[in-house]
Amino acid sequence: MGEYIARPPRAGAAGRFLRDEGGSVTAFAFFVFLMMLLVGGLALDTMRHEMVRARMQVTLDRAVLAGAKSSDAAQARATVEDYFDKAELAQYLEAERDADIQIYLNSARVAARASGTLDTYLMKLAGVETLDVGGVSAAEVRVPKLEISLVLDVSGSMGGTKISRLRDAAKQFVSTILEKSTPGNAVISVVPFSWSVTPPKTIFDTLAVDVTHNYSTCLRFREADYGHATLTSGKSALSNGVPVDQMIYTSLYGGFDNLNDSWRSCFTDEYMQFLPYSMNETALHAKIDSLQADGNTSGHDGMNWGAALLDPSFRQVSAELINTGEVDASLSHVPSDYNEPETLKVVVMMGDGANTTSYFFDKSSPKYRGKFSDLFEVKFQDREFKYAYHIYKHRIRYDESKCGHPRWECVYEADGPEESVYYLRYPWGDWYYSIDDNRWITDHDFDDLEHTLDGYISTEQLSWEMAWGRMSPSWYEDITGDWSPWNDYVGSEYVDGYAKDSRMRDVCGATKTHGVVVYSIGFEVPVGERAEQVLSDCASSSSHYYRANTTDISAVFNSIAANVQNLRLTQ
């Protein structure tokens, strides 16, 4: 029987591993593996965190930028929420805080915040269950200045309900613009027009004008003056300084010293003067409330003045208005340069009908222009008797009856203001019509007024420009039977509606080339006819032209105000 030899039991794999000298390397590798797993988990969770954070931040940035273009705070917040809903991040968007959203007409600031927690995957092995994620973003869109010319048709066809509704709509437009603007950053000019446009006296005096009378401030522009946005006349470096013609003040119809007719060439009433560069809501409302409907239509002149009030060359005019206290001193920069990046210039042009004909006396062959008219002004003054004295004996008597004696001289002193009476010369003979006495007198009697008119001071032959400010061509014909002035006035240098249409298109085009935004409103104008075509052509685009009637004119002005706001915030 063989000998039994005892053997130790076989070692298992673990045992061999522990006795194997290479096991120490493998243990280290296992440790490294565990560490790599932990680090990888950290990297994975960190990457997930950064992806969510970046996605959240991008959504915030895009949301607030879009919200800043909204017309009001509610719309801005709704825009922000909509962006987060579509990005499936709505659960992270925080509630709106005070002052997060501030929407004005000329500026907007929208801020938003997002925050939340993100569950980890492998970082849990290190005891990190969640990671905080969040972001904040704000967008500010700002156009600090707004210059508006509100050009309004107040011709006779605007009477009744139309002018009343226009006043309400224009006042609401002004209030909207000012209320949604930072104080001092929106300036509005109100330019009413009918036969012509009436500038304030300060502006008239500042411009280079060929002054021929003192009745009115209306100006007559040359055809070429409508081909650019400047007014041409003036003393500034941006103007050529060529004096513009003063429009003759008269009326097609009317009696002597009674030219307050709808057919007068210039309306001198205060309500017709335009109001330049105002930031005062009360003053703007008062101007609009004062508007009255009368006269024919010259939309080309309304637009010409509206454009000029936005042109940088008018800074000399605004400076003079500041000097006289008519414009706030803070507006020395108005009108700003066209290339000023933070200024929006706007014209709102409203018309209710086609342009009509205006009349002018012939200047090229001036039979009824210049010196030596047929009208004479005779001045006199009431006198009070003081005393009579004898020319030889130097005796003084306080007896006015002595004045009739050849050897007595009487002394009188002026008593009261100077007064005038007028005489119209008959164009074909030596007769003079006494307007006060309503009778004709001979040239001999007229020449002897120095001796026959108590308190006589002087006789002056007026210029035609001064004469027409006293009488109309129709009255002249009634008195003399001479139709020549009438025919000259209505048939020589008239500008008809079609010529005005062309000039209006020219000035609209010129101001638009400088980046001025032009909105136009056709107030109950016939569809597709002349008035609508010209107003539509004047607008910056077809979408900038609005049709309106008495029931929706306010809605149209409100729409333009909102459009101006959106336009400013997307500049």
Image: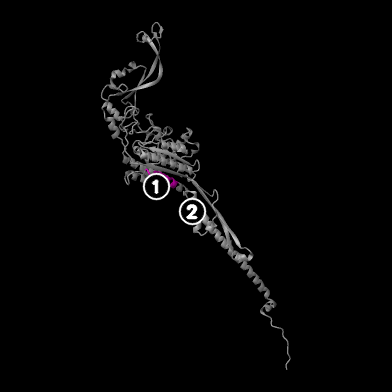
Q: Are marks 2 and 1 in contact (CB under 8 Å)?
A: no
Judge whether residue 562 is colored magenta: yes
Residue 558 circle label: none
Q: Main secondary structure of the magenta part?
A: helix
Vertical position of residue 362 compared to residue 507: above or below: above
Q: Residue at x 54, y 56 (%)?
A: 93
Q: Amino acid at mark 2?
A: Thr
How many residues crowd around disc 2 within 10 Å: few (fewer than 14), some, or many (20 or more)? many
x and y, in percent, of residue 427 in the image: 27, 25
Q: Amino acid at mark 1?
A: His
Judge whether residue 392 is colored magenta: no
Of residues 119 and 203, which is closer to you in this image?
Answer: 119
Tell me the quarter of the picture where residue 238 sits: top left
Of residues 484 and 127, which is closer to you in this image?
Answer: 127
Residue under numbered circle 1: 544
x and y, in percent, of residue 549 in the image: 36, 44
Q: Secondary structure at mark 2?
A: helix
Residue under numbered circle 2: 79
Vertical position of residue 36 compared to residue 156: above or below: below
Vertical position of residue 548 compared to residue 220: above or below: below
- The answer to whether one can see residue 76 in this image is yes
Span of residues in magenta = 550-564
Q: Residue at x 60, y 66 (%)?
A: 122
User: Viewer-nearest of labels 2 and 1?
Assistant: 2
x and y, in percent, of residue 508 in the image: 38, 43
x and y, in percent, of residue 223 in the image: 35, 39
Tell me the quarter of the picture where residue 39 sits: bottom right
Q: Is residue 421 left or right of residue 126?
A: left
